[in-house]
Amino acid sequence: MTTAKQHLVRTAARNNAEWCAAMSRSHGVESEFGMRVWHAPTRTPLFHPDAVTLAPNTAPATVTEGVDATTPGASVKDSFADVDLSALGYRILFEAQWVYRPAGGSADTGDRAWEVVKSPAELRAWADAWDQGEGHADVFRPELLDDAATFVLAERSPDGRTAAGAVVTVSEGAVGISNVFAVEGGPDAAWPFVLTAAHSLFPALPLVGYEHGEALSAALRHGFEPIGPLRIWLHDQQPAGR
């Protein structure tokens, strides 16, 4: 990885950790930023890691020392894909790519309008559309709307329903994009409005995030470039030798 790309990955990892911290706060879970790792001492909300590495070449013990592995589901976002946690009872859940899009540029969204979600009722409608019947909509709590760096974006269909959405997290040097979805058409149907909204809100900042599988392919089709790998580790076994 080049020095320039490593800097971008550091920026993306920090932004993502700030999003994880905001999501955790909305569930009443406090967390801590260190020089090399962000972590929460108790279990974070569903789909969110308990630790995120912020610098490369971090020792495994440093990565996991603040994580509660005594309760099921502990997970770590290995932002540089350079930490081996297998000896500590973790396995790789999946691998992904950080992505980056330079500042500027937008896309044509046609006649459909977008907005920043403001009320608990709007957030619930957004979460139901994001969830698509899987039963996890409650992960998005009204307290999230109090976070000044978090913007929940909704694209409206002509009849006013949530047609697509995303979450934007602004941090120093970048805007993070996560939870991109469209009720119909998949991420390709959502990205045009997301790019337009992000550019309208923060025209001078580049966009970062991470994706894998078809969602990664969709992001690349909409002007993102891969800048480095990451891994998600899940704790589900006894450490080696115990």
Image: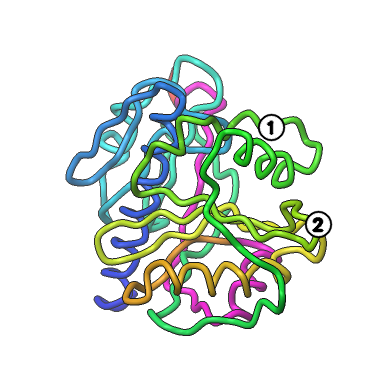
Q: Of callouts 2 and 1, which one flags the residue occurring earlier in the amino acid sequence?
A: 1
Residue 218 is one of the magenta-drawn residues: yes
Location of residue 190 by image quarter: bottom right
Residue found 48% across the figure and 84% down from its top:
105
Instruction: Where is residue 240? Give x, y as percent.
Output: 45, 27
Which residue is under mark 1?
136
Instruction: Pick out the residue farthest to the front.
Output: 159
Residue situated in front as seen by the camera: 67 or 18: 18
Is 167 displayed left or right of 13 in the figure? Answer: right
Which kind of residue does numbered mark 2 sit on? Answer: Asp
| Left-right relation of 214 to 106 | right
Closest to the observer: 202 or 178? 202
Q: Which mark is residue 159?
A: 2
User: Where are the magenta residues, as a range?
Assistant: 212-239
Quadrant housing the C terminus: top left
Q: Residue at x 32, y 39 (%)?
A: 60
Q: What's under tag 1, amino acid-wise?
A: His
Q: Position of residue 109 (x, y in %)?
A: 66, 76
Look at the image and say whether residue 229 sits in the magenta stretch: yes
Image coords of residue 124 (percent x, y)? 65, 36
Residue under the point 30% across and 78% down: 2
For label 1, the SS is: loop
Q: Residue at x 36, y 46 (%)?
A: 17
Q: Which mark is residue 89?
A: none
Q: How many neighbours does mark 2 have within 10 angstroms: few (below 14), some (14-19), or many (20 or more)?
A: few
Q: In front here: 105 or 15?
A: 105
- Which quadrant, please, contains the N terminus? bottom left
Instruction: Give the answer, above or below, for where 136 lies relative to 208.
Output: above
- Work out how far the residue at label 2 is from the one at label 1, CA to CA, in angstroms: 25 Å
Secondary structure state at the residue bearing disc 2: loop
The scheme the figure's colours follow is rainbow
